[in-house]
Amino acid sequence: MHVVALTLAGRVLQQELAPMTHSSSDPDRIAERLPLLRRRAQMVQATRKFFDDRGYLDVDTPYAVPVPGEEVHLRCFRTELEHADGSREVRFLHTSPEFAMKRIIAATGLPIFQLARVWRNGEMSATHVPEFTMLEWYAPGADLDALMDETEDFVRALLPDQVYRDGVLIPVTEPFERLTMQDAFARYVRADLLETAGDAEALARQAKVSLRDGESWEDLFFRLLLERIEPVIGRERPTFLTHWPAEQAALAKRDPADKRAALRFELYIGGIELANAFEELTDPVEQRQRFEADRQRRLEFSPDQDWPLDKAFLTALPDMPSCSGIALGFDRLVLLATGAPKIRDILWLGQSF
C-alpha cells in the first residue's frame, strides 16, 4: 500500500514544483488532484465503517454556537444570528464540537463520533487551514490507555503499512511508542519538567537556554517542546506523548499518581501532530475554575475573543459518565495516507488558503 502513497506524493510534488500557469479553473485544479481526493473519500467511508462496527453512534452538532470553546490561543470566526423580529445575537463558528458532544454523552451515555467541520482563524501553513475537518470520538468507560489502544487500531485501519513524510518511511504496523512528557523532557531537554513547573528560570537553567524578555514558564515549555521534542518524536514510529503538565490540559483529569500531570496525550507521526486526547474531567466546579482562568488569560492575549461561559456544558457535566475523548485532524490523516505535501492538496476547493 505504501507504493500507492509514494506515487500520489510524487504526482503532487511535481505539481508543487511545476511553473504556475494561467489555468486555474475548478475542473483543472480538481482533475490534477483527483487521485488524492478519491483516496480522501475512501477514508471517510472507512472511518464511518470503523466506528459503526464498534457500536459508535454518528452524531451532528451545531456549527454556529454562542460559545466556540475556551482555548487560550485560538482565534474564532464571528457571525450573527438574525431573528424574525429583527433582533440579533452573536454566534461563533466552533473550534471543536467537544462541548456539544459531551452534552450528548451526558444525556445518553453512548459512545459517539463525528466528522465535523471546524474553524480556527489565522491558521495557515502546509498543515493548517482556517476551515478543516476534525474527527472526534468519545468512549464512555474508557481510560487513557484504552483510548490509545483504540486510536492505534483506527490509525492502522486507515493508513498504509508505511507512511512517507519528509524523506522518511515510517512503519505503522509496529506498536506505537508511549512517552510521558516528563520522560520526553528528561531525554531530549535534560530537564525535570514537573519539578520546575511554574519556575521559568529553573527550567531554563536545566535546559541550558536563556530566557527571552517576558518569557513565562508556559512560553518556555512550548519553545522547548517545539524545538527539541516535536522534531524528533514520531519519526521512527508513531508516538503518543502523554501525561502533560496539568496547566496544559484544561479539560482533562489530573493523574491520580501525580497531580502535577494531567491525563492527556497527543499523537505524532512524521513530524505531524495528529490528535489530542483527554481522560475527561467531569467535576463542574473544577471545570468552571479552569474555564475562568483560561478566559482571563485569553482576554489578555486577545481582548476581542470574548464570550460567556458555556453554562449548558457545565450543567451537563455532573451527568457525564467516566469517559475519554479525542480530536483527530482528519485532513492531516489524509496527508499521511497519500504523502501529499500540503493540506490544500487534499481539499476539493481549498486553493484560496
Image (cartoon, rainbow, N blue to C red):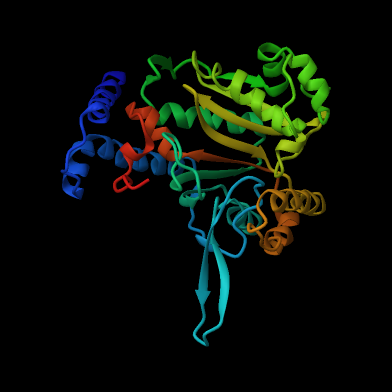
Task: State the image coordinates of residue 233 (x, y, percent, origin top left).
Answer: 56, 18
Q: Is residue 85 among the parts visible in the rendering?
A: yes
Task: State the image coordinates of residue 191 (x, y, percent, origin top left).
Answer: 75, 16
Nearer the observer, 267 or 308: 308
- Please state, as top left, top right, bottom left or bottom right, where the N terminus lies in the image: top left
Q: In the figure, 207 relative to 333: above or below?
A: above
Task: State the image coordinates of residue 197 (x, y, percent, origin top left).
Answer: 81, 28
Task: State the image coordinates of residue 158 (x, y, percent, origin top left).
Answer: 39, 31
- Please state, as top left, top right, bottom left or bottom right, where the C terminus lies in the image: top left
Corner quadrant of residue 342: top left
- Locate residue 25 relative to residue 352 in the image: left or right: left
Q: In the figure, 290 relative to 88: above or below?
A: above
- Locate residue 114 relative to residue 249 in the image: left or right: left
Nearer the observer, 228 or 65: 228
Total number of numbered labels? 0
Corner quadrant of residue 23: top left
Q: Name the residue at 63% across, 57% down.
A: 305
Q: Is residue 262 among the parts visible in the rendering?
A: no
Q: Name the residue at 26% across, 29% down.
A: 12
Corner quadrant of residue 319: bottom right
Instruction: Find the residue positioned furthest to the front.
Output: 213
Q: Name the residue at 43% across, 46% down.
A: 132
Nearer the observer, 45 or 299: 299
